[in-house]
Image (cartoon, rainbow, N blue to C red):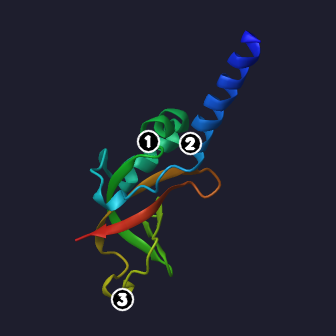
């Protein structure tokens, strides 16, 4: 009987922890303080040299990336052909032109080995 009670408590605790992990609140990246401020080219070189160490350092962290605007899409931009960032909201992209320097803030979600770019989401452009 004692073992059954312990087993039920362990299962209940595991269920509670799993529920809290799955349904955690959405982060507000724009209000968070950045863990790192980096240059787009420098972070790309860092990931290409050792992806495991770089992922451990940057993954799921809020970072500020500075670089030159090299691509504009509907809800995303690319800096230095190395950092791809997507926006949660529509951004007035008419005031941005290719080649201009930008500073963005977002959450690092990983490195795309095929395209060789670092990916950010929940990005905002810092003025």
Query: Distance from label 2 to label 1 (Cα)?
Result: 30 Å
Q: Residues within 10 Å of mark 1 (few under 14, many from 20)?
A: few
User: Which circle's residue, 2 or 1, is located before the other in the chain?
Assistant: 2
Quarter of the image with the N terminus is top right
Across and down, in percent, residue 63 comes to 35, 51
The residue most toward the front is 1
Residue beneath the point at 46% across and 46% down: 60
Indicate left or right for 107 with 3 as reference: left
Circle 2 sits on which residue? 21
Is residue 45 shown above or below 96?
above
Residue 94 — which label? Answer: 3
User: Which circle's residue, 2 or 3, is located before the other in the chain?
Assistant: 2
User: Which circle's residue, 3 or 1, is located before the other in the chain?
Assistant: 1
Is residue 5 shown above or below 64?
above
Residue beneath the point at 52% across and 43% down: 48
Query: Distance from label 2 to label 3 (Cα)?
Result: 39 Å
Circle 1 sits on which residue? 46
Visible residue check, residue 80: no
- Picture quarter containing residue 105? bottom left
The residue most toward the bottom is 94
Give the number of the mark in front: 2 or 3. Answer: 2
Q: Nearer the viewer, residue 58 or 82?
A: 58
Residue beneath the point at 47% across and 53% down: 25
* Element under disc 1: helix
Q: Are marks 2 and 1 in contact (CB under 8 Å)?
A: no
Give the number of the mark in front: 2 or 1. Answer: 2
């Amino acid at each position: 009987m004692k073992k059954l009670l312990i087993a039920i408590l362990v299962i209940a605790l595991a269920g509670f922890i799993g529920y809290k992990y799955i349904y955690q609140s959405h982060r507000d990246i724009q209000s968070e303080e950045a863990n790192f401020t980096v240059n787009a080219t420098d972070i790309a070189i860092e990931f290409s040299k050792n992806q495991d160490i770089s992922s451990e350092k940057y993954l799921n962290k809020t970072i500020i990336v500075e670089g030159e605007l090299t691509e504009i899409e509907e809800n995303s931009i690319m800096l230095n052909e190395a950092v791809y960032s997507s926006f949660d909201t529509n951004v007035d992209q008419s005031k941005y032109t290719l080649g201009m320097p930008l500073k963005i803030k977002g959450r690092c979600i990983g490195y795309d080995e095929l395209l060789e770019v670092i990916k950010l989401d929940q990005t905002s452009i810092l003025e």
